[in-house]
């Protein structure tokens, strides 16, 4: 019996789309075709590869009027926010602008006697396993530089956003990227693991859960296949006594609640210096009380349902456990909260690190806020996590932020902003957040391998 992948819309629990998974034999055939196409693609000038990829990006943009409501139906983000094309285009454009310089040989010597240099060689076929929460932007982080580097790409998207990979592939093919070179595939977990174990891919990039990352590493064990992982997060914010309080509240609460809290680098815990704590909490509560929870297809909705009832139930469990252990919940249950995917956003105080809501990834519209005495206490609390993706520091003192940042176990340190991927900087994490690095010139290093040339002329 053929396994079917089914996307259940969080709007009303209806079946939105379903696709049959490929068999292992079918998947092998697809990868073989990609491998052949990659050989010809890698021979094209970098400029031509980049031009075709950017044409594909533009073709996705031309579909945006259809994509925005389609995304709302798949994973619940309100249409008022206009989809992901801004970030999608920004990231691809930056990677295109640095492709030539990042992929250029590293020249060591060019004399009458020797030519010594280090070339960048594509891995071959790159598997991109993308998540549902920002399905276009997370995918393009690797798809664009992988193709520009001369690789073929096999894209496996999350079941919750089943239609995204199809749209991306169609747009890129229409723009001149060969069909065999960039393929959207439907695979189950066992087939994916089997393909990795067979060394079918030169590189694997996975964004998702810690459990998913462990499964990827186990499948690749002994194959020496390169793997890039961005996994869980529990990103902190720290508000110091000299912070712009209004900006800190507005930005951090938006970072905690936007996309119903379903952001890889969303703010999940906030530490506020004692002198600002009460005012910060009061302003935060006021903001959240003003949200409009509802159908994401309604222009008035500012907070849509979570992508799946299962995700909402985990957030409810964390909140309930925290309250049972002494936390204070500041937001009364919204009338639109149906006990399912539609979930009341919540702010908690009187929390501590014995509570799961301050330790485990919530990935939903809840944030715990704690009072701290000084930088030392804040640093210790921010580091008291199994994850390390980003941290957001709020101060007017750059030197202080840099000093604190160097003591934090995290991939990115923000000052006076949060929840943003700067394509010029490496997107990376530490601890259980994963390994590797996307975007920036470092992405090109990871999506190629070095090959050294030592040419003696005489």
Image (tube, rainbow, N blue to C red):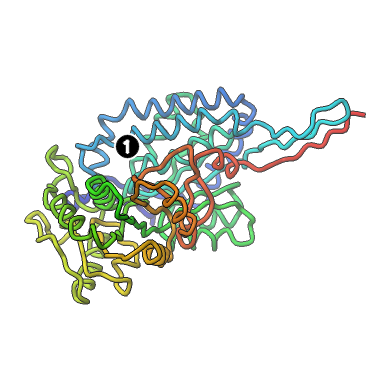
- Bin the neighbour count of mark 1 within 10 Å (Cα to Cα): few under 14, some 14-19, many 20 and up: some
- Of residue 195 and residue 413, the one placed in the foreground of this image is 413
Q: Residue furthest right?
A: 458
Q: Residue furthest bottom?
A: 325
Secondary structure under the numbered disc 1 in the rendered image: loop
Q: Which residue is mark 1?
A: 84
Above or below 52: residue 4: below
Q: Tell me residue 344's x, y (percent).
A: 15, 57
Name the side, left or right, on which 370 lies relative to 111: left
Name the side, left or right, on which 86 lies relative to 214: left
Q: Residue at image x 40%, y 65%? A: 376
The total number of labels drawn is 1
Q: Tell me residue 377's x, y (percent).
A: 37, 66
Above or below 93: residue 241: below
The C terminus lies in quadrant: top right
- Of residue 243 and residue 44, the one placed in the foreground of this image is 243
Q: Residue at image x 37%, y 43%? A: 420
Is residue 16 visible in the rendered image? The answer is no
Q: Tell me residue 266's x, y (percent).
A: 32, 52
Is residue 247 visible in the rendered image? The answer is yes
Q: Residue at image x 50%, y 44%? A: 426
Q: Residue furthest left?
A: 335
- Of residue 447 and residue 429, the one placed in the foreground of this image is 429
Q: Residue at image x 21%, y 64%? A: 348
Name the side, left or right, on which 109 lies relative to 429: right
The N terminus lies in quadrant: bottom left
Q: Tell me residue 197's x, y (percent).
A: 58, 57
């Amino acid at each position: 019996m053929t396994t079917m992948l089914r996307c259940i819309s969080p709007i009303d629990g209806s079946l939105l789309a379903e696709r049959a998974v490929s068999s292992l034999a079918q998947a092998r055939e697809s990868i073989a075709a990609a491998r052949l196409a990659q050989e010809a693609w890698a021979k094209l000038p970098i400029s031509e590869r980049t031009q075709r990829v950017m044409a594909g990006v533009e073709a996705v943009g031309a579909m945006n009027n259809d994509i925005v409501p389609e995304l709302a139906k798949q994973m619940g983000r309100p249409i008022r926010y206009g989809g992901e094309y801004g970030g999608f285009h920004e990231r691809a454009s930056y990677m295109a602008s640095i492709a030539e310089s990042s992929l250029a040989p590293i020249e060591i010597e060019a004399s009458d006697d020797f030519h010594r240099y280090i070339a960048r060689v594509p891995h071959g076929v790159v598997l991109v396993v993308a998540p549902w929460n920002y399905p276009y932007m997370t995918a393009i982080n690797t798809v664009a530089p992988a193709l520009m580097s001369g690789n073929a790409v096999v894209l496996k998207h999350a079941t919750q956003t089943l239609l995204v990979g199809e749209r991306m592939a169609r747009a890129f093919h229409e723009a001149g990227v060969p069909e065999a070179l960039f393929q959207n595939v439907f695979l189950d977990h066992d087939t994916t693991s089997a393909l990795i174990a067979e060394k079918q891919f030169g590189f694997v990039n996975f964004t998702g859960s810690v459990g998913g990352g462990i499964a990827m590493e186990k499948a690749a064990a002994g194959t020496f296949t390169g793997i890039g992982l961005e996994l869980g997060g529990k990103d902190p914010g720290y508000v110091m006594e000299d912070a712009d309080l209004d900006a800190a509240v507005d930005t951090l609460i938006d970072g905690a609640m936007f996309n119903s809290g379903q952001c890889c680098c969303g703010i999940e815990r906030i530490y506020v210096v004692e002198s600002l704590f009460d005012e910060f909490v009061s302003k935060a509560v006021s903001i959240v009380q003003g949200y409009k929870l509802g159908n994401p297809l309604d222009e008035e909705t500012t907070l849509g349902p979570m992508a799946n009832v299962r995700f909402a139930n985990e957030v409810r469990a964390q909140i309930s456990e925290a309250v049972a252990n002494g936390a204070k919940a500041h937001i009364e249950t919204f009338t639109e909260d149906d006990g399912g995917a539609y979930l009341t956003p919540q702010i908690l105080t009187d929390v501590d690190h014995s509570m799961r809501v301050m330790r485990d990834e919530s990935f939903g519209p809840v944030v715990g806020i704690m009072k701290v005495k000084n930088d030392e206490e804040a640093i210790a609390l921010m580091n008291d996590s199994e994850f390390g993706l980003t941290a957001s520091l709020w101060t007017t003192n750059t030197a202080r932020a840099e000093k604190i940042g160097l003591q934090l176990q995290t991939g990115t340190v923000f000052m006076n902003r949060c929840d943003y991927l700067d394509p010029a900087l490496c997107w990376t994490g530490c601890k259980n957040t994963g390994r590797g690095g996307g975007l920036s010139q470092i992405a090109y290093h990871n999506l190629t391998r070095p090959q050294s040339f030592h040419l003696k002329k005489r």
